[in-house]
Image: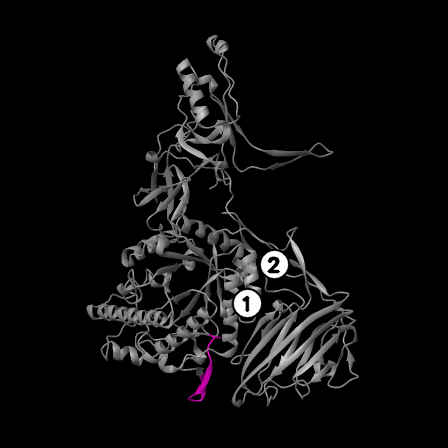
Amino acid sequence: MTFWLARERNGQHHDHIQRFDPRFWTVNFPRPMMASVVTTGPDSLRVDCEFHHEGELAGLIWDSVDRLDHPLCAYATDRNYEHTVLRFRWRSSGAIALDAVNGPTLTIEGRDAQGAPRAWYVRLWNYADGTPEDAQVELRFSDLESGFVLPGQPVWPKDIDRMFVSLVPPGYVAGSSAPLPQRADGWVELTAIACEGERAMLEIGDVLLPPHGEQIATAYDDSFNQTPARLLRQARALGYRGRILHYLGMSHFFRLEESGGRLVASFDGALCTPAEAWHADFFSCAEAMGYSVIASLSYELFAEHCPDAWQQRAHDGTPARTGWEPPSALLSPANAEAMGWLQAVAARIVALLEAASLPVLFQIGEPWWWVVPSTRAPCLYDAAAKAALGGSPPVIADMRGTMTAAQTALLDAAGALLAQSTAALADAVRSAAAGPAEILLLAFTPTILDAEMPELKRANLPSGWAWPAFDRLQLEDYDWLTAGAQSLRRAAYAEFDARLGYPVERQDYLSGFVLRAEDAERFWPLIDAALDEAAARGVAQRFVWASPQIARDGYTRLATPQETDMHAFDDVLYPLALGRDTGVSPEFSTTVAVTASGHERRNSLWSDARLHFDVGPGIRSENELGTLIAFFRARRGAARGFRLGDPFDFSSSGMTGTPTATDERLGNGDGLTADFALVKRYGSGEEPQLRPITRPRAGTVLVAIDGQPVDGWALRDGGKIVFDSAPPAGAKITAGFLFDVPVRFAEDRLDVSGATFAAGEAPSVPLVEVREAV
């Protein structure tokens, strides 16, 4: 399907918003405190905070540069606040009040009149009218002064990058890491937000792309700092409809409590107030916009706040750790307390979904036994797992080794334990729901089916997951997708089908992701093509993972064109034999510029020739003339393409020779790539002319690897050779074949005169080659 990576708006629709629109404020803060911001009306917002240490500070931020929205949705950059006035009503509780030392301060970051970077600290109480916790605030940027008391130092308003209001707990001590006597819960509301003056409005992207059939995935760890209204506005603008897959994350949603001298996730599964407020708003806004939300909860938890007993461990005590920085831990499916915590969290999410009148859709995200990346040691040996697996289970130090019968039995038992834990979580969701609940399971195929660890699937793809254990099966394979490992991806689909048996209409696909912006140009075409591939397999629910990368890289999916038959092709051969009088004309497109001195500059616009034919001279009888007319009418003139056998060039062996498996080099193996396109070369040297072969004759294709004819491949549409297993790195892939040319009638009218034909004059029947995508 058509897509593009938008870097900026270029003529797309735009509108205007009031500067300081509540939807576009953000929050930031140091862990382990937590904060969130939500809109409470068209001119109001609320910030909730949980503080744990004396030195924690949250910032409510307005940025002059929109760094978070998709380029087609972003607001325009305007660093000049001269003669701009911001007014709002301030209400707060639980945070230091406006009149106190260290009270809310507007920090303005930018440059002074000489262009030198600097910051100003504007005490809000100096511009407030009312009480310290309920006041009207008026900020005239051309008249602002920094300092605790007035008069202070004037703010230069013409070059501001960003500004933020600081929120701190009672007992705040700058830089202190000492714990507060108890958790401090605070909130701030800004209402009646109004911006006036010369620069009170900002241009903003206002696209509304047609729905394209794909759905979007989000994650709280990536979006906790934004308002739900902002995220959902962008999703709708970019054409995403239906379901939103929302991952609760592993680090920001849970409440913290002190245990053993450290802060860990609250054992009762409570959400922290900021996360609960954010998700209540997210679900409510989603329902109002016609979305359903799949809430996703995984077995992954921020390591710093994960109780030690909950963590999976290898045989030598090494805890399971992901590669994220800082890392997360993996919860043990055998630990009753950890699994009870997951079930309690799930029940709270179910309550929030139902409070927003949303259906209960719940994903169990990537539950697995971790394998230590550096050693390939499985993490089956935490205390709870060892007890559940017999007390003294056999040691597996490296999943790559040959397994004994006892070790494979251990892996099977671990798989059964994993299946029991996911079934218990699914039951907890169903029990918490007042009505029906749909349970989805997400699996990451490159890890579960790692070829270096063939027995791992015993533990991480248990038979207890087989249909209908869950309502839907969701698969993602981005490591293989972005590496071009097509054969591994296809083999994984077949393995999951055979092992779990979910009908294709009960399967979903997640396509993504692009971790680094520098990979965008290379990875997004693969991700986009994978969406089309999943649709072709019959997968109706497809998700792009994930929204922050969509916004960062400007990924823009476009709807399928309505006139899909414009490039229709009938895979039939032209019915008449071509004689030697048939005309064939290869054509290139070259621009030639002649300089004043008579020298030429030539620019070749096409990498491959386009053929023109005149097949009229091959018609030798009235019966053949009738066949031509019938064939022309069946193709509706120039509307539909068909095959034509070029009498002068139809083989990979020379022009008309008998093909052999080593005629044409298709490429070299890399151990991952399994798809190779047929081509024919013309000329010798380092830059021969390459001709894509999209219409080979199926029964004539021969394939060799390093000169040896092979089986284990299939011919797909478009002249693509698809191997069952990727050829090894460095292997030379060759092929031989006969082929036809895709053509159409050049005109919508066929001129035939019976008198001239009877007199021996052949009609003119021009055909033109159809350039097919490869």
Displayed quadrant of residue 541: bottom left
- Judged from this view, the residue extending furthest toward the top is 759
Disc nearer the start of the sequence (1/2): 2
Displayed quadrant of residue 701: top left
- Judged from this view, the residue extending furthest toward the bottom is 181
**At x 37% / y 33%, what residue is drawn?**
697
Q: Is residue 273 left or right of residue 678?
A: right
How would you rate the neighbour count of disc 1 (Cα within 10 Å): few for under 14, some for 14-19, many for 20 or more? many
How many callouts does the rendering have? 2
Inspect the magenta stretch and tell me whether residue 259 lies in it.
Answer: yes
In this figure, which residue is indicated by the disc labeled 2? 73
Inspect the magenta stretch and tell me whether residue 343 lies in it.
Answer: no
Kind of residue at disc 2: Cys
Q: Tell me the distance, in whole angstroms, between the alpha carbons under discs 1 and 2.
A: 15 Å
In this figure, which residue is indicated by the disc labeled 1? 228
**Under tag 2, what secondary structure?**
loop
Q: Is residue 316 left or right of residue 176?
A: left
**Under tag 1, what secondary structure?**
helix
Kind of residue at disc 1: Pro
User: Above or below — where is 341 with respect to 648?
Assistant: below
Q: Can see residue 618?
A: yes
Q: Which mark is residue 382?
A: none
**At x 70% / y 79%, what residue is drawn?**
136
Read off the magenta span. 251-263
How would you rate the neighbour count of disc 2 (Cα within 10 Å): few for under 14, some for 14-19, many for 20 or more? many
User: Above or below — where is 769 with respect to 450?
Assistant: above
